[in-house]
């Protein structure tokens, strides 16, 4: 298997076009999220290639107008080829079968560190329990220290009313001791207020 950064090269444009065509013809309910993706618009757009096809991709993203200048999101726009997805319930353990966390996220974390970003987060719209399991898997496969925050945040910044898709659960990599402080300084104002009225669950 080969890991490539599509944000830095045109060498795999044909493979990328073939992958987007595959997604467009699929029944993936999230397929519209991928069809207009431009890998060059990301800090890092890692793809895993096996036998001359892309089998997984995800990206490292910055958006200073939404999150501030020191915050980036990893594992954004993650996609796994249908032939490599798990069917049914799968226990998150660790290892190379979890393609994104084993092969791609480590490259994104290295890129974030090289570029000087001190706060890296992941996010998910639903299912905080599964998201916690995912964060723990990422920690086991990368050696980093992601922790899940309570409640949800508006990751779209100053957008009101807030679209439901912008209300997301957050996991912060605390490997950098400044990460949580940077997150709270920039994002506390975007914490979803209605979540504060619910009984919090430590997860």
Image: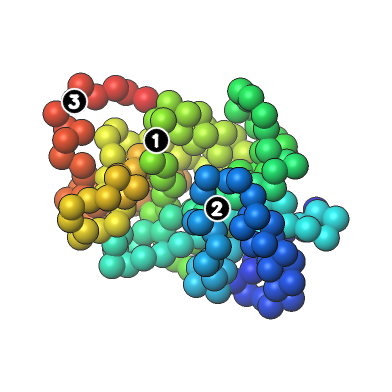
Q: Is residue 69 above or below residue 151?
A: below
Q: Earlier in the sequence, mark 2 or mark 3?
A: 2
**Residue at left 55%, top 53%?**
31
Q: Secondary structure at mark 3?
A: loop
Q: In the current view of this chain or complex, which residue is farthest to the right?
A: 51
Q: Residues within 10 Å of mark 1 (few under 14, many from 20)?
A: few
Q: Which residue is mark 3?
A: 198
Give the label on residue 14, or none.
none
**Residue at left 78%, top 58%?**
53
Q: Which residue is mark 2?
A: 31
* Residue 120 image position (x, y, % from top left): 42, 53
* Residue 5 image position (x, y, % from top left): 65, 66
Is 113 left, or right, of 149 in this rendering?
Answer: right
Is 42 left, or right, of 5 in this rendering?
Answer: left
Q: Which residue is mark 1?
A: 126
**Separation (CA) of disc 1 from disc 2:** 18 Å
Q: In the current view of this chain or complex, which residue is farthest to the bottom?
A: 10
Q: Residues within 10 Å of mark 3 (few under 14, many from 20)?
A: few
Q: Nearer the viewer, mark 1 or mark 2?
A: 2
Q: Earlier in the sequence, mark 1 or mark 2?
A: 2
**Residue at left 18%, top 25%?**
198
Q: Secondary structure at mark 2?
A: helix
Compare residues 85 and 8 and report the one nearer the observer. 85
Observer able to see residue 133 = yes
Locate the C terminus and report the quarter of the image it occupies. Answer: top left
**Separation (CA) of disc 2 from disc 3:** 33 Å
**Residue at left 67%, top 29%?**
87
Compare residues 106 and 28 and report the one nearer the observer. 28
* Residue 176 image position (x, y, % from top left): 41, 50
Q: Nearer the viewer, mark 2 or mark 3?
A: 2
């Amino acid at each position: 298997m080969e890991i490539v950064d599509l944000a830095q090269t045109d060498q795999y444009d044909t493979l990328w076009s073939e992958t987007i065509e595959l997604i467009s013809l699929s029944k993936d309910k999230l397929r519209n999220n991928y069809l207009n993706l431009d890998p060059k618009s990301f800090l890092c757009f890692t793809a895993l290639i096996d036998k001359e096809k892309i089998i997984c991709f995800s990206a490292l993203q910055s958006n200073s107008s939404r999150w501030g200048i020191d915050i980036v999101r990893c594992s954004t726009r993650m996609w796994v080829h249908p032939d490599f997805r798990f069917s049914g319930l799968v226990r998150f353990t660790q290892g190379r079968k979890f393609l994104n966390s084993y092969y791609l996220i480590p490259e994104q974390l290295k890129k974030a560190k090289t570029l000087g970003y001190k706060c890296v987060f992941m996010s998910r719209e639903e299912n905080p329990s599964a998201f916690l399991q995912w964060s723990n898997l990422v920690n086991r496969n990368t050696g980093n220290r992601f922790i899940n925050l309570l409640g949800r945040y508006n990751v779209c910044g100053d957008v009101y009313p807030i679209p439901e898709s912008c209300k997301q659960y957050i996991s912060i990599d605390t490997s950098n001791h400044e990460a949580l402080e940077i997150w709270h300084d920039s994002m506390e104002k975007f914490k979803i207020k209605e979540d504060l009225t619910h009984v919090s669950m430590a997860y």
